[in-house]
Amino acid sequence: MVFLHGNPGFSLDWEDLSERVNIFARTIASDMPGFGNADKPEKFDYTVDGYARHLDGVLKKLGVRRTHLVLHDFGGVWGLAWGGGAPSRGYELDTDQHRCARVSAKKRRVSAKTGGESVQNGGSLFDTT
């Protein structure tokens, strides 16, 4: 399970939840560049696509091929951009705006269920294993 923070925020925002989830699943939370204890490199691409590429690099380095994303605020757009970036990615996601959501990367659309209504739209790292 991958947790992405928002703005303002950082990986430790997820520490309590991650410890509880770690009982039954591997959990990963990373400070995204410019946030928390992460570096703030001058040459980093501080765009949605730049953060999605960064997330892709982190997950590849950790050997993550399929995951459940838990997203908050900016983490939502970064996670959706990451998921839509390759049709072969398989993942599910939860955001603070939706009760539950399932993403079909092959179709590049998000199906979210919120209160009975369905919506469709086309540095620091802790890794508890």
Image (cartoon, grey):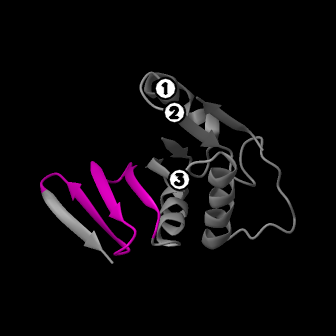
Disc on res. 26: 2
Residue depth check, mark 1 versus mark 3: number of the one nearer the observer: 3
Residue in the picture at 38% in, 73% down: 106
Secondary structure type for disc 3: loop
Inspect this view and state whether residue 72 appears.
Answer: no
Label 1, label 3: how far apart the Cα atoms are: 18 Å
Question: Is residue 112 on the magenta stretch?
Answer: yes
Q: Name the foreground residue: 121 vs 97.
A: 121
Residue in the picture at 69% in, 60% down: 54
Quadrant housing the C terminus? top right
**Quick one: label 3, few (<14), some, or many (20+) residues within 10 Å?**
few
Which residue is denoted by mark 1 in the rendering?
Answer: 22
Disc on res. 65: 3
The residue at the far left in this view is 116
Dividing the picture into quarters, in which one does residue 60 lie? bottom right
**Quick one: label 1, few (<14), some, or many (20+) residues within 10 Å?**
some
Residue in the picture at 41% in, 26% down: 24
The residue at the far right in this view is 42
Secondary structure type for disc 2: loop
Q: Name the foreground residue: 100 vs 24.
A: 24
Could you tell me residue 117's position as x and y percent?
14, 60
Q: Are marks 2 and 3 in contact (CB under 8 Å)?
A: no
Span highlighted in magenta in the image: 88-116
Q: Are marks 1 and 2 in contact (CB under 8 Å)?
A: yes
Please, what is the three-letter code of the amino acid marked with disc 3?
A: Arg
Could you tell me residue 119's position as x and y percent?
22, 67
Inspect this view and state whether residue 75 appears.
Answer: yes
